[in-house]
Every structure is written in C-alpha cells, then in structure tokens.
Amino acid sequence: MSRVLLLLSSSVATLRSSFSSLFGISKKLILLCIFCFLLNSNLFSQTKQTESVQQTWLGYFNQTRFSNKWGTWTDVHLRTKENFVSDISQSILRLGLTYYLNDDTKLTAGYAYVNHYPADNHKNVTMPEHRPWQQLQWYSKYSKFRLMQWFRLEERFRRKVLNDDQLAEGYSFNFRARYNFFFMVPLSKKRFQPKSLSFVVNDEVHINFGKQVVYNYFDQNRFFFGFAYHVNKHDNLQVGYMNVFQQLASGNKYRSNHVARVFYFHNLDLRKK
C-alpha cells in the first residue's frame, strides 16, 4: 500500500510540474503569437493590396440561465466606419436559445439581424442581412487561468445591391464557420474576483463556404489583446486592441482594421438557489 501511495504521489508531482511548465510555455507562446501576427500583417501589407482603417467596436453580451438546461443569448454591436469615430459601418442584434449540456458546455441556436450601412458598393443605401446561427461553446476553468472556445456556423442571407442608391431583389447566400479561442489570466492575487483585473488574449478565425463563394474562402481573422475588469463574480468589462485582417470578395484585396474594442459581458443566473 505504501508503495502505491508513493507512486501516486510521484505521479501527481510530475503532473503538477508538467502543468506549471506548460503554463510558462503558454505565456511565451502568447507573446510570440502577438509578435508574429503583427509581423505577418506588415508582410501582407507590403505584398498585397491592403487598405488600413481605424474603427471602434462597442458590444454588449448577455447570457441568462433560467434552469439547469435552458437559457438565452443576446448580443448587440455598434461599429464605426473609420478614424475610430466617423460614421457607422455596422450594427448587429443577435438572439439565441441555449441548451446546457452541463455547467461548462452549451449549445445555442438563434438569429441575427445585421445592418451594413452605406459603403463602397452601396454608397447611399443600407444593406440588410439575415443570419441564422448555431454554436457549440465550452469553458475550461483553472485556478490560474480560464479558457473559452466555440464553434459557430452561420447562414448568411445578404440583400443584393442594384447600384449605389438601390437594393436589388433577392439575397446572396453563403455559409460561414467561426472558431473562437479566448484566454484570460488574472493580474492580481484576487483571481477573477470583483474589482480585479485580468489580461485577455482572443483569436477568432472566419471561413466562408458555399456555391457563391469564389475567391475569399478565408474571410477574416480577429486577434485581440487587452484587459478585463471584473465588475462582479459574473460580469466583466473588456477593453483593448483588435486587429481584423479580412480578405475581400475579389480575392486579391485585403483590409486591415485597427480596432479599439470595448465589450461588456453580462451573465445572469435566475435559477432558484
């Protein structure tokens, strides 16, 4: 028995040591990813037709849980067009019904309504988009950091444009798949507690597919780093910088958006305690 206990103790110690090493490596990898991403953006800018814009993205996210199995999803977005504060480029209202497989894993399906405000190929008219969506989301919570990931599938119905002043009949359609990776590490001894700060790294890749997609199967990549202020045990305010690198429909033109991102995450649990 003593030999078995000794082996178990040794195994646990080894696992802890490996985990600590992995955590140290992951911090270095995050810094390396930031450096490589900024370097790659500069390389793309030199070899491709890339335009650069500056935007501000404001977002509100709400997840409300009504029972052990059911809840709702709501998020609202407003995005400027250029120079951080000039005009509006897009607004989004997204709603969903969530089914909890367990406390850390959930399925959501819903609908989003998107307004694409006047832009290059529709200078005087707003283009609406209808976007059903389905998502698998899961969390991994540790004492020293937190991970969140999701896979999302979207069906995008965008109104066709006749010219700069008129919409055409019908909709263009394509699917879009999204993978989101979110990493949060606390910056104080009060880990994830109210009135504490955390460092956040987030990356999301968007891939187009469908019959009407010709050149831009890669849609965009959104890379964010910043800080989260924990308002309470469930809510947090995130502020930071995001680079949105997007391939346009022509295939040989790209857009690099330098974004000031401000998101508020509001979580409610209405279950009876």
Image (cartoon, rainbow, N blue to C red):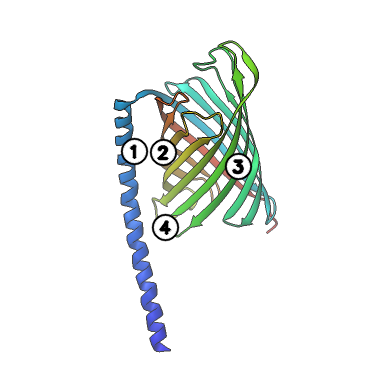
Q: Earlier in the sequence, mark 2 or mark 4?
A: 4
Q: Earlier in the sequence, mark 3 or mark 2?
A: 3
Could you say which is closer to the camera, residue 252 or residue 128? 252
Could you say which is closer to the camera, residue 37 or residue 174? 174
Residue 216, percent across and down?
46, 30
Q: Nearer the viewer, mark 1 or mark 4?
A: 1
Amino acid, disc 3: Asn
Amino acid, disc 2: Phe
Residue carrying label 3: 62
Q: Nearer the viewer, mark 3 or mark 2?
A: 2
Image point (46%, 59%), residue name: 142
In the rendered structure, the answer to whether residue 19 lies left or right of residue 233 reads left
Amino acid, disc 4: Lys
Amino acid, disc 1: Phe
Residue 199, percent across and down?
40, 46
Disc 2 + disc 1, Cβ < 8 Å: yes
Residue carrying label 1: 37
Q: Earlier in the sequence, mark 1 or mark 4?
A: 1
Residue carrying label 4: 144
- Could you tell me which secondary element the residue under label 2 belongs to? strand
